[in-house]
């Protein structure tokens, strides 16, 4: 079995109830004046979140060596929103989120992703929300050439227990040039490659959050490793450490 349990020497706690309370107040007062007045609260919560992301990276690194040396700060999204092309000019996001990939956050490559939002929803997932056409073509060629690799992934008991299946928007018909009877047609028709599951974060003990994230991401690793190979090397879109759009926005699941 791919899943390995990681024993964390230092218990990492995240006061999720305090975070959700802050986000709810922020949603009601989404302006710079309020945020500046409550910046010390934000900074304390961000420090807790950074320590949580560091523990999660260490846990994923036990099964995915490509992320072992990541700096947590390079995986955490800024709370500031990019409002240049949005009708909603609220300056701040109402979730804390992180994307973990070898290139850090904000790149269009397979990533482990989690967020805690204003409603207290903890989303644990990953994949690719908007693969480029070249990446989709690479993935489809890989599936056709190596159907047994996808068979192996979907049969993995830890992956199946954590996520069940690969999700994402579908083409109405088979992609051009792909036989209608090709194996794994549903995955070949995908325009996105996503997995994810939601939890109520307030129902978790403060010291249980890191353990849950690590267990779920270790179960997600076979999918991320498969997808990383399927789509190929990083392209020119996005740059490591950028603060562009979140690769897995809040409303995908």
Image: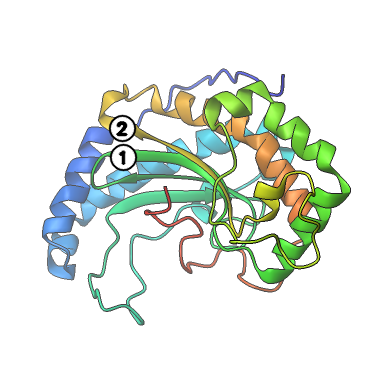
Q: Nearer the viewer, residue 202 or 41?
A: 202
Location of mark 2 (residue): 201
Is residue 63 visible to the viewer in this orientation of the structure?
no
Residue 207 image position (x, y, % from top left): 37, 22
CB-based contact (under 8 Å), mark 2 and mark 1: yes
Q: Which residue lies at the image location 59% right of the left edge and 61% below the top edge? A: 172
Q: Most extreme residue toward the front, as rendered? A: 180
Q: Residues within 10 Å of mark 1 (few under 14, many from 20)?
A: some
How packed mark 2 is, by other alpha carbons closer than 10 Å (few <14, some 14-19, many 20 or more), is many
Q: Is residue 55 above or below residue 146?
A: above
Q: Where 184 sits versus 192, above or below?
A: above
- Figure quadrant of the N terminus: top right
Q: How is the image coloured?
A: rainbow
**Residue drawn at the location 26% of the way across and 51% of the way down:** 42
Residue 170 lies left or right of residue 134; in this view the side is: left
Return the x and y of residue 180 as percentages of the image width and height: 76, 55
Q: Position of residue 246 (x, y in %)?
A: 46, 61
Q: Earlier in the sequence, mark 2 or mark 1?
A: 1
Quadrant of res 79: bottom left
| Vertical position of residue 74 compared to residue 84: above or below | above
Image location (x, y in percent) of residue 127: 59, 49
Q: Residue at x 72, y 42 (%)?
A: 225
The residue lying furthest to the bottom in this view is 84
Residue 210: quarter of image: top left
Residue bearing the label numbered 1: 121
> Residue at image x 53%, y 35%?
56
Which disc number belongs to residue 155? none
């Amino acid at each position: 079995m791919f899943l390995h349990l990681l024993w964390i020497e230092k218990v990492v706690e995240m006061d999720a109830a305090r975070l959700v309370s802050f986000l709810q107040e922020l949603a009601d007062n989404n302006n710079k004046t309020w945020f500046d007045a409550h910046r010390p609260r934000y900074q304390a919560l961000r420090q807790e979140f950074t320590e949580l992301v560091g523990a999660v990276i260490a846990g994923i690194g036990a099964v995915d060596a490509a992320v072992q040396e990541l700096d947590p700060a390079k995986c955490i999204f800024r709370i500031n929103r990019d409002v240049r092309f949005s009708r909603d000019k609220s300056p701040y996001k109402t979730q804390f989120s992180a994307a973990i990939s070898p290139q850090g956050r904000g790149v269009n490559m397979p990533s482990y992703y989690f967020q805690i939002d204003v409603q207290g929803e903890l989303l644990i997932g990953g994949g690719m929300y908007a693969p480029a056409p070249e990446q989709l073509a690479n993935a489809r060629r890989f599936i056709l050439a190596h159907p047994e690799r996808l068979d192996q992934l979907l049969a993995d008991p830890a992956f199946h227990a954590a996520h069940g299946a690969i999700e994402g928007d579908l083409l109405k018909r088979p992609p051009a040039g792909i036989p209608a009877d090709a194996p794994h047609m549903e995955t070949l028709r995908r325009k996105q490659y996503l997995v994810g599951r939601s939890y109520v974060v307030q129902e978790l003990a403060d010291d249980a959050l890191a353990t849950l994230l690590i267990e779920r991401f270790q179960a997600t690793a076979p999918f991320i490793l498969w997808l990383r190979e399927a789509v190929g090397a990083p392209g020119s879109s996005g740059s490591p450490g950028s603060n562009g759009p979140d690769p897995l926005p809040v409303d995908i699941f």
